[in-house]
Amino acid sequence: MSYAGTAFAAPVTGTAKVKLTHVFATLQTGQIDPKPEDTAACRKQVSAPNSRYLGITVNTRYSVDPKSLIMSASSSLPSPQATKPVVLTIKLAPLGIEGQYAFGAFRPTALPDTYVLFSMGTDFKGAKSSILVLNEGKDYNCLVSSDPAPFKDGLSAKFGADQK
């Protein structure tokens, strides 16, 4: 008799490394900003030495029990301040978005003006990371993502969540 069935399935743990290569301006509502000048301003902002997110690699460790749906994740990334070469680790909370495993940290202590987001498919493939840089006093925020189309899934609803 074999006990290799799913009744005794262990949590799936793994690591996903993705590079943040796409920049978008988002409205305060979380929708994509249609103004190209805002996207250009975001590209400049997230490439600056004191806010360098574009081109960094985010390393996310996760543990997901597909049966109980108990899950955890944390993302590690280089400090966005190029003058401080340290690695920051941000603990992410499960977001409960249907059809994917999604995690987020909203204004984490280490990066209080950001949202850090991670998602992957229920098959543990297609890992994506995004960092939303909140711009107080501006009409737009800056999204830096490994996803070329970040507004096409359920996670995009979190781009406008609780920005105050």
Image (tube, rainbow, N blue to C red):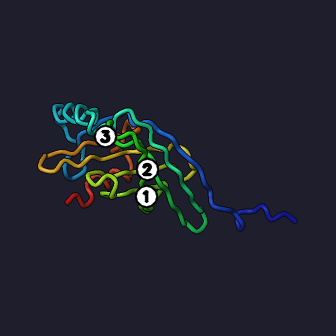
* Disc 3 secondary structure class: loop
Which residue is painted at 43% across and 50% down in the image?
A: 118
The answer to whether 25 is drawn above or below residue 73 in the figure is above
Q: CA distance from mark 2 to mark 3?
A: 21 Å
Tag 2: amino acid: Phe
Nearer-N-terminus badge (1/2): 1
Tag 1: amino acid: Leu
Q: From the top left corner, tell me how far across and down residue 52 is, in percent.
A: 31, 36
In this rendering, would 70 be left or right of 24? right
In this rendering, would 41 be left or right of 123? left
**Farthest right residue in view:** 1
Would you name the residue on which mark 3 appears? 81
Q: From the top left corner, tell me how far across and down residue 20 is, in percent.
A: 39, 37
Q: Residues within 10 Å of mark 2 (few under 14, many from 20)?
A: many
Would you name the residue on which mark 1 appears? 92
Q: Are marks 1 and 2 in contact (CB under 8 Å)?
A: yes
Location of the N terminus by quadrant is bottom right
Q: CA distance from mark 3 to mark 1?
A: 21 Å
**Farthest left residue in view:** 137
Q: Nearer the viewer, residue 77 or 119?
A: 77
Would you name the residue on which mark 2 appears? 118
Q: CA distance from mark 1 to mark 2?
A: 8 Å
The answer to whether 32 is drawn above or below residue 12 in the figure is above
Nearer-N-terminus badge (3/1): 3
Q: Quadrant of residue 164?
A: bottom left
Tag 3: amino acid: Gln
Nearer-N-terminus badge (2/3): 3
Which residue is painted at 44% across and 38% down in the image?
A: 57
Q: Residues within 10 Å of mark 1 (few under 14, many from 20)?
A: many
